[in-house]
Image: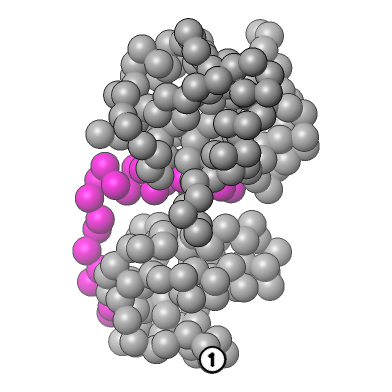
C-alpha cells in the first residue's frame, strides 16, 4: 500500500485529491465525479461517509486512518498520482495538521480531565494525538496541539494571557487560529477548525464533557451573557 503523504482538507488541490477521488469511485461512491483535483464539498462529504462506515471520527479530513481504508483501492494510476502529489507549503501543512488533531479530539469527548490545577499540563507532554484520559484546560488544550505541530513558542504553563502575548494578533478567523474571549488576559480560548455556510466553528476544551465544537456566534453570545464581551484572534502559524 502506498505510504500516507499528507492531510487533505476541503479546498486543497493536487494529484493526491484525484487519486483519492478515483479510489472512492471504485469503492462505490457514485455521486462523486471521477475527475477533479480539488477537494470540494462533495469530496468531503464522501470522505465523511467512508469514515462513518468504518467507525472513525467523521470530520471529512483525509488523514492516516482514512488513508489506510482508501489507499488499498488505488489502482496503478492512482498510486502514481498519489506519489507524485506535491507537498503543500510547510506552514500550511502545520496549520492543517493542527486542525486535524483538534478535530480528532472530538472522539474523546468526556474521556479527558478538565482541570486548572497541577494536571493541566499533562496533555502537553503526551504523544501527539494521545487525548484519552489526559488533563488540560482550554489554554493547554490548544497549546498542546500547537506544540505537537512544532510551534516552539508555546509551553506547558501557557494560559490565555500568555497566549495573547505570544501570538500574532489578526483581524479575522482562519483555520488553526485561536480565538480568545473576554477582555484583559481573556477567560477562554479555542481553535478554529471548521467553516461552513459562512459560519466559523471552533474546537475547545472547557468542561468535563468536552472537547466539543461550538459556532463562533454561539460562543460570543455565551460569554457576553457571562459578562465577558469581546474577542481577539491569534495566529501562531504566520
Query: x%, y% of residue 93?
Result: 32, 48
In this view of the protein, which residue sits in the foreground, 18 or 83? 18
**Image quadrant assignment for residue 213:** top right
Residue 135 drawn at (x, y percent): 67, 23
Label 1 element class: loop
User: How many numbered callouts?
Assistant: 1
What is the magenta range? Answer: 79-104
Left or right of 53 in this view: 144: left
Image point (22%, 50%), residue name: 89
- Decide if residue 146 is in sight here: no
- Direction from residue 75 to residue 223 in the image, left or right: right
Q: Is residue 186 above or below residue 150?
A: above
The answer to if 80 sits in the magenta stretch is yes
195 up-or-down from 155: above or below: below
The image quadrant of residue 120 is top right
According to the picture, the residue beneath numbered tag 1 turns out to be 30
Quadrant assignment, res 39: bottom left
Question: What percent of the width, then of the height, locates residue 226?
Answer: 68, 19
**Is residue 86 inside the magenta stretch?**
yes
> Looking at the image, which residue is at 48% across and 9% down?
185
Query: Whole-percent x and y of residue 184?
Result: 48, 8
Quadrant of image for the N terminus: bottom left
Main SS of the magenta segment? helix
Tell me what residue is drawn at x 59 percent, y 17 percent: 228
Q: On the rendered image, what quadrant is the C terminus found in? A: top left
Kindly identify the residue that appears in the image at 36 percent across and 78 percent down: 19
Amino acid at each position: 500500500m502506498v505510504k500516507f503523504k499528507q492531510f487533505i482538507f476541503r479546498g486543497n488541490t493536487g494529484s493526491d485529491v484525484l487519486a483519492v477521488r478515483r479510489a472512492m469511485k471504485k469503492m462505490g461512491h457514485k455521486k462523486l465525479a471521477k475527475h477533479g483535483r480539488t477537494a470540494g464539498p462533495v469530496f468531503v462529504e464522501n470522505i465523511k461517509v467512508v469514515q462513518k462506515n468504518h467507525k472513525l471520527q467523521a470530520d471529512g479530513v483525509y488523514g492516516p486512518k482514512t488513508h489506510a481504508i482508501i489507499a488499498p483501492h488505488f489502482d496503478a494510476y492512482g498510486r502514481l498520482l498519489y506519489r507524485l502529489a506535491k507537498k503543500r507549503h510547510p506552514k500550511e501543512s502545520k496549520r492543517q495538521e493542527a486542525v486535524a488533531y483538534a478535530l480528532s479530539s472530538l472522539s474523546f469527548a468526556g474521556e479527558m480531565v478538565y482541570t486548572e490545577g497541577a494536571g493541566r499540563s499533562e496533555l502537553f507532554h503526551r504523544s501527539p494525538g494521545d487525548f484519552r484520559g489526559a488533563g488540560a484546560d482550554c489554554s493547554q488544550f490548544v497549546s498542546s496541539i500547537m506544540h505537537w505541530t512544532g510551534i516552539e513558542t508555546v509551553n506547558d504553563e501557557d494560559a490565555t494571557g500568555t497566549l495573547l502575548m505570544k501570538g500574532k494578533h489578526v483581524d479575522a478567523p482562519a483555520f488553526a487560529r485561536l480565538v480568545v474571549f473576554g477582555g484583559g488576559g481573556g477567560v477562554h480560548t479555542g481553535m478554529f477548525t471548521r467553516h461552513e455556510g459562512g459560519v466559523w466553528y471552533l474546537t475547545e476544551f472547557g468542561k468535563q464533557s468536552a472537547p466539543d465544537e461550538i459556532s463562533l456566534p454561539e460562543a460570543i453570545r455565551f460569554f457576553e451573557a457571562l459578562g465577558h464581551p469581546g474577542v481577539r484572534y491569534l495566529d501562531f502559524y504566520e
